Amino acid sequence: MIARLLQLIGFDADRIPPDAEMRLVWTNVPSSWRVFVLIGVAVFVLYAVLFLYRREINTCPIWCKRFLSGIRLAALALLLAIFLGPAVAPIQKQTSYPNVALLRDASQSMNTEDRYLDDESAQIVANATDSSVSSIRSRRPSRTALLDEVLEREERKFIKEIEELGKLRLIDFGNDVIDVETRPIRKSDETEQETDEDNPQTMEPVAALPKTDSTQRGTDLYQAIAKTINDDRTSAAIFFTDGQHTSNESGPDQLLAIAKSAGDEGIPLLFVGLGDPDPPRNLQVSEVYADPQVWRGDPFEIQVVLQAFGVESQTVIVTLFERKVLEDGKLSSTETELQRREVTIPDGGGQQRLIFSHTSASEGRFSYTARVTPIENELSEADNEPESPAEVKVLGEQARVLLVSGSPTWEFRGLQRVLTREKSVDVSCWLQTMDVKRQQDGNTAIDRLPVTREALFDYDVIILADPNPIEFDAAWLDLLKQFIGEHAGGFLYMAGPKYSGRFLASAKTRELRDVLPVGFGDVRAVEVQTLLASNARAWDLGVVSSNVDQPIMRFYPEPNRSLDQWKTLSGIYWSFPAQQAKPASRVLIEHTDPTLRGADGARPLLATGQYGSGRSVYIGFNGTWRWRQAGNNSEYYKRFWIQMVRYLIAGRTLEGKRRGTIEADRFRYQLGDRVNLLARLKDASYRPLALEQVSATIQTAGKDPVPFTLKPVPNQPGHYQSTLTARATGQHIVRVDVPNQLVSEKAPKIEASFSVSTPTVESNAVWLNKSLLSTLGQASGGGYFELNQLEQVIASIPDASRTIDVQGTPIPLWDTSRVLLILVGLLCIEWAVRKQFKLM
């Protein structure tokens, strides 16, 4: 009928698209109260026309009156139709296509090279890659390589079929979920004539997917599913994964719940398994660790962590090796075998920590690694040696220590003996009560307290054990602050009941409080309080457990064992009441008397801090000499004080030419961790360096250095910082390049080291978890598929496309010549009849 109407009024039908339907619409139809106005006007016009023609003169017969009324009403109806805006709207069919999510596991477990010892698993992979079982077992492709290979097969047929069902949304997931790309719908031969609102591609070759970057250090299936179902246009989600969920934030119950939520949303989860479902047999040396700085001729421990999975009880051999680190940071080609040890692996495997003891006869930088002999059908022999060897700097020169004491206390006598007998320390003692005619104790005897810059700066560490303030003045204290803050010297102050109150309150020496890592209130009142306090009982050592692995506190490699040993040492009788630790300081021991707790917490007894470039330590009690009763030959007492001296030395070079320090916030990291670096730098005059940025490099063993920059820390002159991401395993060395114009002829070495290892959670759980993937797939209305069942995966994707009618721009019908002629014709007919019957 619309077509006949268009033909009648002379409308050009070519203006309508050939594949569109036509619909008559009115573009100017009034709304609301205007509809009633229009109806009223139309009724009034109808009545007026009929009324007027009924009252015409009798010379016009009744049939003529009726005829003229019809002609007049037809003309008015045509005008009304023109006013309402008649138009024809083309209606076209458009198809809306859904998203099909393709999610690839990008965690580090996908780098596993499976052996596929089970024939069924090997045959599945062989069928998926169109190869033989023997070929799969010999070349052992990683799961990532296998996934990329399968998706590339048959000119990317699988990808093409997905693109014909919907827009492909490519997602990589691990501990993070990353949108890689989204591709438009692809027209097939059957749908080539359809129109897609998203501008589908024509039949062009399927573009290759970006290669999978399997570097993420964990797998969070929950977040991957959650991000997929948040898109209400998704019709299905296809996961290529080994099914290992390593996130601590969601467990099996949460995974099952979100899989059911996906089913409720009508989004089936289709899991394609990658990897060997049988738990692997594997030996792994996961870590080798040693203190980064030791002394020549001193024995030190090298820890080796050996992990075994899926193995029966047997004996293996672990060998420790040493390599020299050359000046350019690369390892020497010569490897020296140090020790070999037989280790019994219990049935089923487990973790063992082996401790090797070694003494280096020469100074320099050395790399230590361990290697375990392979076992039959082992998953991977690449991890039989750790990616990150331990790097140790062996110091050859003795540390120069100045020990000052106000009186010959038990504390002074014990400490003097320990340091004098320690081969790595050259101690000079200054006992203030010593007769001037008698020689002072120590390896290098002195006859006066060093009071000049040259004399004082010749030492590496200064220890004040309850000194008498009478021998010190403000000038000496200022020199001490320069020694610590500018010359990176180590400083320790040990409080005592005899002089501490006067020393810290004296106008000449009170500036020492600026250097210490703790704060005090009214020191004179504190002294009175201390004298009135009862020292009748010993209070247990309040060792802060989170800091027991700090170098001063470490008795054993295992923190829990060190903590247990600290609990056996003699407690505290007397202490000097410091109020609280300063910001950025670290409290190692607190007082356990609850009555001494203040608003800021327990009273700090042992605290460490940084003053400028140097380190400072505060010991607010005496009585460490009582610890000599513990262990064999006072071993814990000696270890505490030797570790204390070495901690204080670590802030500077023994040559006394330290121009700054750079430190990482930890010694050990895992891949993906953030490494925070802080440098404290000085110019040639030992003043804070003032530059807009400082160049530095980071180098992994055996690789070229990578440059980066350090930026100034606001409001902290001479302090520079940078944050890096741990992207490679192994030992890393950071070196700061001080500008040549600001240094002497020989540039100082400003460097730090740290190690990066693979997260154990990803390297331990590496088998294909079929049961979890099957459960999640069924809960969502999807399923689990093997790698050779990709056709079934495509068949399981529901058709979520929708065809809708889309109305085009209406084309007016009233502005044609025929409509004008019809209107004029009606008016002319009425005029002619009226003239014939002599009507006005």
Image (cartoon, rainbow, N blue to C red):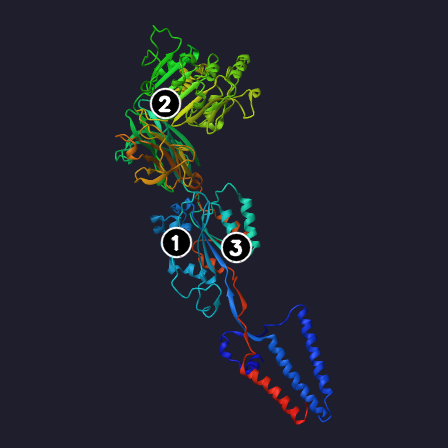
Q: Which sits in the foreground, 458 or 256? A: 458
User: Mark 3: which amino acid?
Assistant: Asp
- Counting from the top left corner in percent of width and height, residue 473 is at 40, 16
Secondary-structure class at tag 3:
loop
Residue, disc 3:
231
Residue 719 left/right relative to 522:
left
Locate residue 818: give its quadrant.
bottom right
Q: Is residue 549 above or below residue 429?
A: below
Residue 356 left/right relative to 88:
left
Q: Which sits in the foreground, 94 or 211? A: 94
- Counting from the top left corner in percent of width and height, residue 674 is at 42, 39
Could you tell me how far apart the alpha carbons at marks 1 and 3 are, in whole angstroms? 22 Å
> Quadrant of the image for the C terminus?
bottom right
Residue, disc 1:
210
Residue 141 left/right relative to 770:
left
Which comes before the other along the chain, label 2 or label 3?
Answer: 3
- Counting from the top left corner in percent of width and height, residue 52 is at 72, 85
Could you tell me how far apart the alpha carbons at marks 2 and 3 are, in whole angstroms? 63 Å
Residue, disc 2:
483
- Counting from the top left corner in percent of width and height, residue 109 is at 42, 44
Which comes before the other along the chain, label 1 or label 3?
Answer: 1
Q: Is residue 810 above or below residue 410?
A: below
Q: In this view of the protein, can residue 490 be seen by the observer?
A: yes
